[in-house]
Amino acid sequence: MFFMFSLIPVLSVGLCGTKLGCGEGGCGACTVMISKYDPFQKKILHHTANACLFPICALHHVAVTTVEGIGNTKSRLHPAQERIAKSHGSQCGFCTPGIVMSMYTLLRNKPKPKMEDIEDAFQGNLCRCTGYRPILEGYRTFLRTYVYSFLLCFSSSYLHSLFQTMMSSSLFDSSEFQPLDPTQEPIFPPELMTQRNKEQKQVCFKGERVMWIQPATLQELVALKSQYPNAKLVVGNTEVGKKKIQYKRKIVIYFYLWEKKNNTSHWSAGITFGAACTLSSVEEVLRKAVAELPSYKTEIFQAALEQLRWFAGPQIRNVAALGGNIMTASPISDLNPVLMASGSKLTLISVEGKRTVTMDEKFFTGYRKTIVKPEEVLLSVEIPYSKEGEYFSAFKQAYRREDDIAIVTCGMRVLFQHGTSRVQEVKLSYGGMAPTTILALKTCQELTGRDWNEKLLQDACRLLAGEMDLSPSAPGGMVEFRRTLTLSFFFKFYLTVLQKLSKQQNGPVSVAREGRLGKSESHCKHPALPSKGQLVEDTVGRPLVHVSAAKQACGEAVYCDDIPHYENELYLTLVTSTKAHAKILSVDASEAQSVPGFVCFVSLLHVYTLTGGGSKSGLQVTCVGHIIGAVIADTQEHSRRAAKAVKIKYEELKPIVTIQEAIEKQSFIKPIKRIKKGDVKKGFEESDHILEGEMYLGGQEHFYLETHCTLAVPKGEDGEMELFVSTQNLTKTQEFTATALGVPSNRIVVRVKRMGGGFGGKETRNTILTTVVAVAAFKTGRPVRCMLDRDEDMLISGGRHPFLGRYKVGFMKNGKVKSLEVSYYCNGGNSTDLSHGVMDRALLHLDNSYNIPNVSSVGFICKTNLSSNTAFRGFGGPQGMMIAECWMSDLARKCGLPPEEVRKINLYHEGDLTHFNQKLEGFTLRRCWDECLSSSNYHARKKLIEEFNKQNRWKKRGMCIIPTKFGISFTAGALVHVYTDGSVLLTHGGTEMGQGLHTKMIQVASRSLGIPTSKIYISETSTNTVPNTSPTAASVSADINGMAVHNACQTILKRLEPIKQSNPKGSWEDWIKTAYENCISLSATGFYRIPDVGYNFETNKGKPFHYFSYGVACSEVEIDCLTGDHKNIRTDIVMDVGTSLNPAIDIGQIEGAFVQGIGLFTMEELRYSPEGNLYTRGPGMYKIPAFGDIPTEFYVSLLRDCPNSKAIYSSKAVGEPPLFLSASVFYAIKDAIYSAREDSGVTEPFRLDSPATPERIRNACVDTFTKMCPSAEPGTFKPWSVRV
């Protein structure tokens, strides 16, 4: 099986730079550079590829460059590594090597790139931490005219002042960067160059279950296909992937190195491409043709280029073949509708000869099936030139613009009778509307011979609405949206053609391609600077680079799965339930035992054996993904194969999946919490208006780039075990493992070096994996490792709680709120986990930032048959505040007043009491509000938006300003060792997951001890150094661990005081040496607990929070009313972070949280079947924000002169509070939708649930097209997916 591995397992032997993030080419963490000599172009080609998909056998005569091969911290960083590190573009660092390699490959091909080149290069890379801005900021310095290009999108009146702001507030100095020198790059291996003149020979690799054959000639390929007609042909392996061929006996033929594979020929009728041409090479050829040929001949080419521009990422386009795209017969292919509508011709070859077929309505015979015979090979594809009087367009709608599969895609062609607007021929081809790519034959037939006018448009839409019908239960769901898109796309095509016809006398006009609004400009405006007189050695308040940034950029940073394998190590794969609720009748692992390398199967019964407790009968599973057991084998592949062989029989029970079902069944986790204040009934009686409504907020997947991982190493004595875990919560991990093994906690040591992201998802949920791995290691007596695949992780670990909020609000004519009654329901999943804490925080944040005199609130945690939901950045706060902003938005519209005025009139003042009776002290929110209004130029831009909306019917803009108030509390410990050479080893209770905690703690210790940061080192976090730690969560890790570190340092300094007094001119090293000689302890512990924090829900008394963080954001968006697409035009944020410990890290946290919030409120949607099965198990279906989704203009300001006396060095928590500010994008979208609805004559309020996906936006923009595609009556069909 070795040869069937993708490239990544081979690279991980001794190298840890290339990361496995998803296993399906969707995140870019595994990006490497592939180099080869191309005999056709007679030059060396460099391109990016996903190591998780690229077959190891396909590397014959190919060079691979990983991040370790371009630079390192021991000698010299490559400029691509240095700039991302020093510009603060690496936080958790797990995605960093892939991003570095994308940039490096671009620089190898274009040493002086344009900004568009950089943005395009990153289409296949994702980052969950940074918000992307610092990455683009750092790499923008490679542009030839860096400062000039940086200012291009601004009017001249801003240039001088903006330039001054940039220079004074930049978080890095670009003049320190080493220049790029292309002459110093590694050379292409000479031995591969010598192969170019040698005769190629057929290559064959044989393994346990698969045979890989690489033919050298076309004749060999045809003969092989005749011999093995059912063999799988692969070129880039991007569709097949390693998982789909791993467990079946297959013959794979690598369709790449035969002589005509990438030939392109220009004929009188069009351009012929070899079927194995990569999509990147097709794009290059078409782009050249468009530039050189008359525009009337390239209509089809331009449409194909538009589709290719958004086709996956460059890592996929560089290896995926044109022929593969056709032959996989995907019903949502981006290119097949273009090829079908254009009548492209396909040449097929077999031992019997060649034949040519037209790609028409007969080509696809069923789902993933074509008319091509098993023994035939697709040889070439001819894409025709367009004719005079012929027009072509292609459209695609997806959840995310970059690197996303289509929801609906189409190709549309019309040919007019010469010199007229009468249709001679029309072809409308759609993907996403049937099991195959289809032609709207009836519609096309009816439109032929008609004039291109309004009547044709109306008839075409009526006909399409009938012909492009879908069952309300159709796979993929979104039925009304998909049907509406077919009409919207035709309307866009109609307008485009109409425009070109009107200019016919002047020749065809070029229609600007859709894309980004401009360059992604983002700035940090006046960060808080260190105080005057601050010593240079004192780094507090300075933008110190993340201490691990350089190692992360070079691939040297070690994560859990990077720890070298032990000699006798085993691998574990989980066996999980496929039913949401069922009794287990039997578990049969006998077939698994026959798999090579199988060692044992463990289950809950083994835990009962160890602990002597629990019932051994009547076991039930309560969610899909419920862990039943695990297989342990000698390798990862063998354990996976054996796990697939475990057979489980169930007796299914009725599951509860949705919040609504839980309400109906009264399935709640007790206790039910309430907060009451004032007289709600009297408040309603005194109100001028009363408004009732509800809002639903979907859940969110953490999508940390590093999935859950554990390595358990038994020590062989007294039950001792060492655990290397990717966790935010060492104490609970230690406690749960000890319980599972039946040993005291002092026998278990848990270690964490760093995590590749956490966001709350590793606070408790890692324990369900860690305990299983520990039990396996205990049973076998050998080290056991497990890192979850992305689909396993998403299925098992849970995410943010979905919420349903029902409200009744009373208010005055001026918008002042008098009374609120609100009920919150959250989907907790199958266990309690942290749901009580999440609901508590939601209730405590139901006011957001508004003073509500009378409140009655209640929170219900719904127990359902889904994987238990858990902590996620914000911990219930965003859900509580989002529902508050929903009723605030609605009441402003009810009053007919500007939303910003209504929000401001309801804001708290200094000294006010919250609804939970805590007095607000140091209330800076109104300062943030006023500063954000001013810096965003809110009122002037609002007038421009109103004017824009008057002039545009199908594009609308909206803007919204939103505040946030976020409460903070927790406890921590620290340990400081000072060694005789003066170096300091610092350990604290917090874990590093990209938030820069270790960096900040070094800064705190540096100031506390009065020594340079270079003398201080943090190795790891472990339970044998700092016991009983709090989880790294709730945004307060810098606060509490910083105080603990400070306290420990003060203990050391107090011991050193007599020595310093006796030798005041001595150095730090002198004092330490003297202390050692005088037997003074140079080790100290520190502990900190936030004082006077506690709250009682029953009495509504106490102080739940130590202090509050405040912020305000103003966002502007533009929506496409026809497709539901939206663009984030501009965001201005003003955030109170107290006196920043590190402005670069704090701003990175603000931007990262905001962009993660954009995902929560506008993109990321978890989709479940009615039976509780999760559909969205990877980046293919679950979309987090990409580089192109950040605001085109992104401004972050740190509020000045607002020290916080309640935290270390006057700082404030910053990790979670900014996330909710992205609600400003959601409500800006809602504002734009209102404008679209008004143009349709619809003025009543409407409900917009979160996230505001293209589907929800388009359906809310009520118009003629949506009315032609009505929804099916609920209850009359079984939906494909349900809202949980």
Image (cartoon, grey):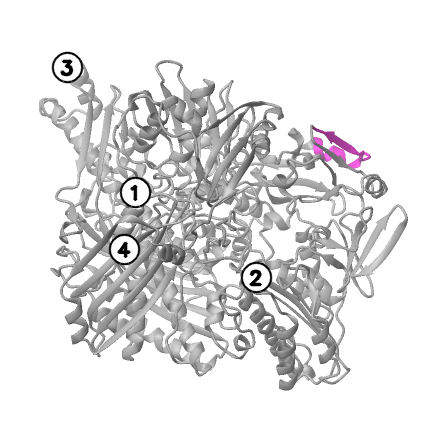
The boundaries of the magenta stretch are 191-207
Confirm whether the magenta stretch covers residue 384: no
Q: How many marks?
A: 4
Q: Are marks 1 and 2 in contact (CB under 8 Å)?
A: no
Q: Nearer the viewer, residue 348 or 1204?
A: 348
- The residue under label 4 is 859
Q: Quadrant of residue 961?
A: bottom left
The label nearer to you, 1 versus 3, is: 1
Q: Amino acid at mark 1?
A: Ala
Q: Amino acid at mark 4?
A: Gly
**Mark 3 → mark 2, Cα distance in angstroms:** 80 Å
- The residue under label 2 is 473
**Mark 2 → mark 4, Cα distance in angstroms:** 33 Å
Q: Are marks 3 and 4 in contact (CB under 8 Å)?
A: no
Neighbor class of circle 4 (other Cα within 10 Å; few <14, some 14-19, many 20+) is many
> Residue at (29%, 80%) from the top-left corner?
896
Which numbered disc, 1 or 2, marks the residue that appears first in the sequence? 2
Which numbered disc, 3 or 2, marks the residue that appears first in the sequence? 2
**Mark 1 → mark 4, Cα distance in angstroms:** 22 Å
Q: Amino acid at mark 2?
A: Ser
User: Would residue 199 be found to the left or right of residue 1280 on screen?
Assistant: right
Which numbered disc, 1 or 4, marks the residue that appears first in the sequence? 4
Residue 1096 in the image: x percent, y percent?
16, 49
- The residue under label 3 is 1078
The label nearer to you, 1 versus 4, is: 4
Residue 118 in the image: x percent, y percent?
52, 53
